Image (tube, rainbow, N blue to C red):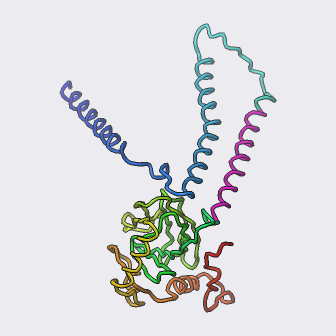
Amino acid sequence: MSKRLSSGRLRMVSVLAAGLLVLLSGCDRRYLIFNPSGPVAEKELHLIILSAVLCAVVVIPVLALLIFIVYRYRDKPGNKAPYTPEWSDSKILEIVWWGVPIIIIGILGVYTAKTTYSLVKPPVEDVKPITIQVTSLDWKWLFQYPDQKIATVNYAEIPAGVPVQFHLTSDQMMNSFWVPELGGQEYTMPGMAMRLWLQADQPGTYYGSGANFTGKGFAHMKFKVVAKPQAEFNQWAKQVKKTAPALTEAKYQQLAQKGLSEKQTYSSYPERLFLDTIDRNGGKYMKPEMKHGGHDMSMMDHDNE
């Protein structure tokens, strides 16, 4: 019996030690959402901190009261806590436990709405933004640059300090585009074009991924956003234009098939590829009278509205 107990304890210690090592090994990893590298991510971090503080205003007193009540009114000989079986209500307590949550929700709602509406505009107004069209596929990401007329797969390069408006759609399942250090996630949906403003303040490489489960290849839907100085970005775009192959309609159809893909770069792509993708998928959900031949390009533009 003692040997079995000893072996059981040994296994338990081993499991605890292994768990501790896993936790310690992750201590050096950055918590990406708490490491904002752009104005959008900074605003969202402030909103997260405010939400945590307001939650703490409720949670901490409630836990403290729970500990106090359990200790103060415990069943113990000689406990002199008052016994009031006829007690029914307290106006003061009613005001507290209704009033405090209402105030907290009001503060959080106003601040959340204000922050959310501020994010539909370019993070900075004095710098000309660029547009990148993003299409989620199973299981890969296609990035198209309308101004540079180039495209990439599973990575994107952007100029540092420049607002970037991502136009997002999907040619397969619904997904979610997320670059934690630059800002929050936005959904990609078939037949729709969503917008997301992001900006990297400094040159660097930022982790991105799909944040919505889309099947067995979901874990591989990762990409990197590389921010470079404007001059280096321009040089990269020119180099791609000179050396990379073209993305034809036939190649796109192959790319759109289910499966994984390595990084790819293209010097051109069909002009209406992004809009045709929206139209093709939108036909499944739109009423016949709502269908039309195309989208007004001005609706997809990034003019300073």
Q: Position of residue 112 (x, y in %)?
A: 67, 53
Q: Position of residue 236 (x, y in %)?
A: 39, 75
Q: Is residue 253 above or below residue 209?
A: below
Q: Give the camera-side residue of 198 and 134.
A: 198
Q: Give the camera-side residue of 54 and 172.
A: 54
- Tell me the chief SS of the magenta region: helix
For residue 239, side relative to residue 170 (left or right): left
- Which residue appears at 79% of the width and 27% of the height? 90
In the rendered structure, does residue 177 fall within the stretch colored magenta?
Answer: no
Looking at this view, name the residue that lies furthest to the left: 3
Q: Is residue 180 above or below residue 195?
A: above
Looking at this view, name the residue that lies furthest to the front: 231
Q: Is residue 296 above or below residue 197?
A: below
For residue 248, side relative to residue 123 (left or right): left
Instruction: Provide the residue span drawn in magenta.
Output: 94-120
Looking at this view, name the residue that lies furthest to the right: 91
Q: Position of residue 136 (x, y in %)?
A: 46, 74
- Which residue appears at 28% of the width and 34% of the height? 12
